[in-house]
Image (tube, grey):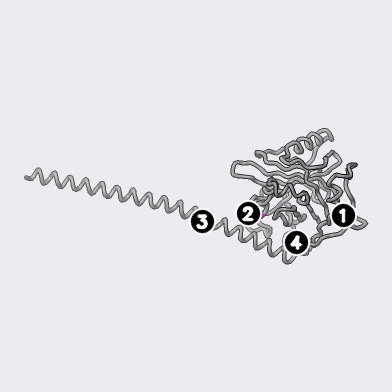
Amino acid sequence: MESRVTYQKKKRKKKKKKLRFRKWVIVVFLIFFLSIFLVSASKVFNWFNDNNKVDNITEDILENVKVKEKKDNENTENINPPEDKWNDYWDYIKMNLLEIDFNQLLKRNSDTVGWIEVKGTNINYPIVQTTDNNYYLTHAFDKTENEAGWVFMDYRNDPVNFNQNTIIYAHSRLTGSMFGSLKNILDSSWYTNKNNHIIRLSTTTENTMWQVFSVYTIPKESYYITPSFNSNEAYLEFLNTIKSRSEVDFSGTVNTNDKILTLSTCKDNFGNRVVMHAKLIKKEAR
């Protein structure tokens, strides 16, 4: 009898140990998944919070900074007009330029170098520039930390005397802010409307207009963001390459007499980029 009782006690002890072990396993798993949930919830909250802050900054800028259409005057210059009188160029140069009152913008952020508007998208923002291409990936226009970042010009570019290739970057936000709507350029609803093929860019020294000639997606690379070239041959090869990449057949040509504007943003989480190139067709000194 005693041995049988002893056996039953041992059996109960083992059972209790198993139950305790299972409880600990459950507790550990609960803590693990709760931690993941809390981290994820925090990231989602920060994502929405950053977007909301950027939207508020943008709204405040648009309400308080004077942005107006500017008709041509004696200072307006048409750049490299084509011989082909049927080229869309002749329709585009009839459009008004954009003029910005930079006084308010410079008071808010001395890094301000311009303003950009891309037809058929939500892109209508001040452009900033600093000494590297990292700062405005994680800071908003007011220089507060923000994962939405801001629209910025490549630090290698000269915002007064444009390089052969002036490059502008911004994050592609799911909300469509910053360059989140740049992906629209690959939709037929965008590129079949020829009035969309225009970028207006204003700086502190001049107002400019650019005609789009190439749009495409590509894995991350540095070639298309080369700002200047050592020879016309190298520049011509570059222009031919980026034009041949276009997923849309735009009218018009581009040559080594042209200065171009490049917009670049992320397409996805795999390093692919959405890219737009345009050439300078009209400018006006301020």
Q: What's the mark number on residue 42?
A: 3
Q: Can see residue 83?
A: yes
Instruction: Please say whether residue 91 is one of the residues in the magenta stretch.
Output: no
Give whichever of discs 2 and 3 has the lower sequence position.
3
Task: Give percent across and percent down for residue 260.
Answer: 80, 44
The relative height of residue 101 versus residue 129 in the rendered view (above or below) is below
Residue in the picture at 83% in, 52% down:
208
Give the camera-side residue of 27 and 98.
98
Mark in front: 4 vs 2: 2
Give the CA separation, mark 3 to mark 1: 48 Å
Q: Earlier in the sequence, mark 4 or mark 1?
A: 4
Circle 1/circle 2 CB separation < 8 Å: no
Residue labelled with disc 2: 148
Q: Position of residue 261 (x, y in %)?
A: 78, 46
Q: Name the amino acid type tagged 3.
A: Ser
Quadrant of the image containing the N terminus:
top left
Q: Earlier in the sequence, mark 3 or mark 1?
A: 3
Q: Amino acid at mark 2?
A: Ala
Q: Which residues are magenta?
A: 173-177
Name the residue furthest right.
74
The residue nearer to you, when weighing 231 against 80, is 80
The answer to whether marks 4 and 3 mark residues whose Cβ atoms lie closer than 8 Å is no
Identity of the amino acid at label 1?
A: Glu
Which secondary structure lies at badge 1? strand
